[in-house]
């Protein structure tokens, strides 16, 4: 929501990938950083077979464990450590998916992020009740295809909300 005071999350779109009694894990999908995928390939000593992918940005996935890589992607085969987020999205944290991307054998749709957003048990629910977050259905188009700068507005529009018309101040009747 526009009133989010935490700079780690202000104007972000965060895909909740796992939510259970222990807490929640999400990946911010609209904050590209200076690093490109080619730089990540270099760090991992991978030679890309397709030079087009080296220019894809890496995203800041959240403030927790920013040294760890997280790959959101369209479903394809099996990787060492993947979680199904939805019928259209998987989250993989193992290096083999990056190797497949570099070799040109990876998923069609890919978003690579460093770090994640995490909530303890009940924390995300409390933030939702405090009107901190706007919840919308996950959309593969928003996750993979909409330009990063437009994702916050487009995500809100999926439920008919013009985010620029939402006040940062919340009221309770």
Image (cartoon, helix red, strand yellow):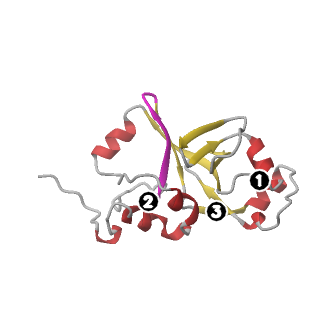
Discs 1, 2 touching: Cβ within 8 Å: no
Numbered tag placed on residue 33 in the rendering: 3
1 or 2: tag closer to the N-terminus? 2
- Tell me the residue at 57%/48% (across/down): 89
Q: Dot 3, how many residues are within 10 Å of its Cα: few (below 14), some (14-19), or many (20+)? A: few
Q: Is residue 118 left or right of residue 169?
A: right
Question: Taking 118 as reference, is 9 above or below it?
Answer: below
The residue to which callout 2 is attached is 10
* Viewer-proximal residue among 154 and 76: 76
The residue to which callout 1 is attached is 101
Q: Is residue 37 left or right of residue 160?
A: right
Quadrant of the rendered image containing residue 171: bottom left
- Tell me the residue at 84%/56% (across/down): 42
Discs 3, 1 touching: Cβ within 8 Å: no
Which of discs 3 and 1 lies nearer the camera? The answer is 1
- Tell me the residue at 48%/65% (across/down): 151
Discs 3, 2 touching: Cβ within 8 Å: no
Q: Which residue extends farthest left?
A: 173
Q: Is 11 colored magenta in this rendering?
A: yes
Segment colored magenta: 10-22
3 or 2: tag closer to the N-terminus? 2
Real-space Cα distance between discs 1 and 2?
30 Å
Q: Dot 2, how many residues are within 10 Å of its Cα: few (below 14), some (14-19), or many (20+)? A: few
Q: What element carries label 2?
A: loop
Question: Taking 25 as reference, is 29 above or below it?
Answer: below
- Tell me the residue at 76%/42% (across/down): 95
* Viewer-proximal residue among 22 and 47: 47
Q: Is mark 1 on a helix, strand or loop?
A: helix
Q: Is 32 colored magenta in this rendering?
A: no
């Amino acid at each position: 929501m526009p009133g989010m005071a935490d700079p780690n999350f202000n104007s972000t779109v965060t895909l909740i990938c796992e939510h259970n009694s222990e807490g929640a894990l999400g990946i911010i999908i609209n904050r590209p950083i200076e690093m490109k995928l080619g730089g990540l390939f270099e760090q991992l000593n991978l030679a890309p077979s397709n030079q087009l992918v080296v220019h894809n940005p890496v995203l800041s996935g959240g403030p927790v464990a920013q040294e760890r890589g997280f790959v959101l992607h369209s479903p394809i085969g099996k990787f060492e450590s993947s979680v199904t987020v939805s019928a259209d999205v998987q989250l993989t944290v193992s290096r083999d998916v990056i190797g497949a991307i570099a070799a040109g054998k990876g998923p069609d749709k890919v978003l690579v992020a460093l770090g994640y957003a995490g909530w303890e048990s009940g924390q995300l629910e409390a933030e939702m009740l405090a009107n901190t977050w706007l919840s919308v259905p996950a959309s593969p188009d928003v996750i993979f295809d909409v330009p990063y700068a437009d994702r916050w507005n487009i995500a809100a529009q999926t439920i008919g909300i013009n985010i620029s018309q939402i006040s940062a101040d919340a009221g309770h009747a």
